[in-house]
Amino acid sequence: MLLFAWIPLALAFVRPALAAVGSENTTTTISIYNDRLLVSINKANGAVNKLNFDNTSLLGVPSGSIGKWYFDVQGVPAVAPATSRYYEIGTSKVAKFEVVSGKDSKGFAWIGVIMTETVLRVNMVFKRYFFIKDGETGVHTFARITLPQAVDGVNYGQLGEFRTVFRPNTNLWTHLVTNSVQYGHLPSAAAIAKQVTVQDATWYLGNTPEDPYVSEQSDYFTKYEWAAQYGDHKAHGFYSEGSTIGLWTVYNNLEGYLGGPLRSDLVVDTNIYDYYVSNHRGASTPYLGTGYDRLFGPTFVYANKGGAMLDLLADAEKFATPDFDVEFYDSIAPYVEGFATSAQRGAFSAKIQLPKGAFDGKAILTQVGVDHQDSMDSTVGQYWANITTNGKVTIPRVKPGKYRLTCYASGVFGDYIYDNVVITAGKTTSRSWSWSPDQNGAEIWRIGVPDKSAGEYLHGLAKDPNHTNHPEEHRAYYGQWDFVNDFPTGVNYTVGVSDYAKDWNYIHYSRYGGTYTRKEYVLDNVNEWTINFELTAKQAVDLPSKIGTLTVQLAAARTPSGNLDVPEPSSNSSDLDLSVISNDNAPLVWTIPYYHSSSCSQRSGIECYNIANKYKIPGSQLKQGWNKLVLALPYNASGGDANFRQYSVDVMYDAIRLEVGKDS
């Protein structure tokens, strides 16, 4: 684990008090500032090497790969002289910098720097935008990728990652904050000195139980425990206990990001991240080709001080709305290609009659014709909002065009989908819909709550009782929860008797082991889970003429491909079969394709790429009285990227339901 170096804070840049905002351009750096904030960019590598707030350096002293706020990508083809698809943008030393300035309609002055770099060998153009405004202690940022014309013979493939990284080199920061529930101390230098590596980006720190991080959070540190789902995420960052300073990445507009509200990703560890694109937990990523052009952002990076950690977070979260600073954004739009002004946007308003029992609903606008998780068209934004209990939803500031409307809600199986919603600039599209729930006969039973998450099961969202911050259990390194100890004879669930919060694990493995505390792999009583249930005489009437529909909604699945979205070369199959065996009959098989795979489980997730299937069980295979269903993964199956080659394939259940009715 890389921790911030323990060195004194850098001396702050002090500008002359001559204007509300200003700039300084030297042979090596270009800086913009207002009365309280300074952003200085190193022209040689394109990284911010100074971010100063009220005469305090938030980055510290640049030293190699630390002490800087940079911008990188995993997706530039490895054309000579490059040998990797990874590229840190701006390092060519030929990036161009432009200073722009103006005032918004309220008279507030602003200033910005636009960095442009063309990677000539592949003809990809990257831009990064920084703006600061008079009276604000934050930086408005955007990023852009364009590929005007693909180079003949170059395989561009997928854009695997695109992000900014704030990587300090200072002892200023004491706490990392994902949200108002997930926060804690950074591990101390003493704890790190005795750490033991257990998997990719994961360490055992239990050798120092007195360390504040260990006592508060976990015996393990993994960067994945600090991830966030983007759907309701507002802000994340660092806090300084001594200086009572906070630094926050605020998500005020996610239209240019990818993956929709179910996407989750890294937001903090010893760095602060802003992932525009990533497949860390199986989210879809776009293919690059001629004409690709997407603007990512805006994001507001905000500094504040003088309060408790969660109070400063709440202050930052106030800006996490698309209506924030609209006059300012309208005034900079001419300098940010692809960003629409208020006059160029419309709005969406709807009244949706929700199914009975629905709660916590969301309405999403994305690309027409594809699942909202796969909306990759570079010209189409993504927008969503929560649906009120009376079915109303409003989404402001939507770019004009045609969209797919997707609605989902907790308590309801399936989604509501309507294609070709038209948004027109300067107008509000108002519609009403009635969402009829998915039904396949009389419901016999269900396990779990359909909510796109495996959080209700053992070690899901339950709070860890053994650490004082009581983090959600799923956030810990998965090896902290030993499946074999929890289920020594496997999962054997009886409907009406068992409790899914205790008797159904949050991860269904094919094999279990290879962890810090269990090196050997256990194969028996792992890959097959049993569900026992009783059909009454009334439910069993005329069964041979009926069909049992077993709906299995998954919060995530891990095939041998892990999260790579490409075939796995070390495995006989890149796909994954999840079979259902009813009363010892021949199995019904759902083959989950490799491109729906995620690394949710070993990366501390609880909801990742969602998929579902309906198994049609002949009524002749069911009977009055007690029945048995077995959910089976392949025996002793593993695979994945280089970091997780031996890790078990698995699934994480959202919810399961059995209905019996006439075959439709």
Image (cartoon, grey):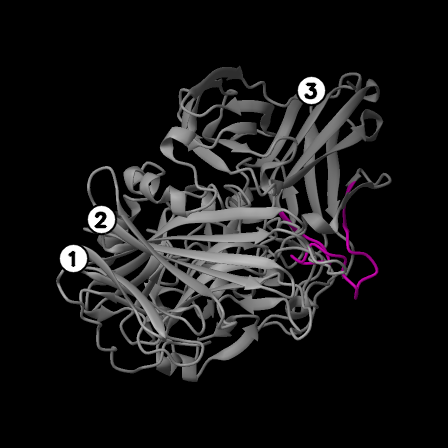
Q: Looking at the image, which is closer to me, 77 or 159? A: 77
What residue is at 75 percent from the left and 21 percent from the top?
Answer: 540
Foreground pick, 636 / 52: 52
Can residue 659 be found in the magenta stretch?
Answer: no
The crowd level at tag 2 (other Cα within 10 Å; few <14, some 14-19, many 20+) is: many
Nearest-to-viewer mark from 2 and 3:
2
C-alpha gap between disc 2 and disc 3: 63 Å
Measured as percent of width and height from the top left, residue 327 is found at: 28, 38
Residue 577 vertical position relative to residue 400 in the rendered view, above or below? below
Above or below, 563 relative to 270? above
Can residue 607 be seen?
no
Q: What residue sits 42% from the left and 57% below the top?
A: 464
**For the magenta stretch, what is the residue range?**
556-580
Q: Which residue is mark 1?
A: 19
**Circle 3 sits in a helix, a strand or a loop, which is it?**
loop
Residue 185 pos. (x, y %): 32, 67
Pick whichever of labels 1 and 3 is earlier in the sequence: 1
Local crowd size for mark 3, using a 10 Å CA cut-off: few (<14), some (14–19), many (≥20):
some
Q: Amino acid at mark 1?
A: Ala
> Could you tell which of marks 2 and 3 lies nearer the N-terminus?
2
Our reading of the magenta stretch's main secondary structure is: loop
Q: How many marks?
A: 3
Residue at image point 68% right, 41% down = 531
Real-space Cα separation, disc 1 to disc 3, in angstroms = 71 Å
The answer, for residue 120, to whether it is visible in the render is yes
Mark 1 secondary-structure assignment: loop
In the image, which disc is placed on residue 441? Answer: 3
Q: Position of residue 567 (x, y in %)?
A: 77, 57
Q: Nearer the viewer, mark 1 or mark 3?
A: 1
Callout 2, which amino acid?
Ala
> Eyeballing the image, is 69 above or below 444?
below
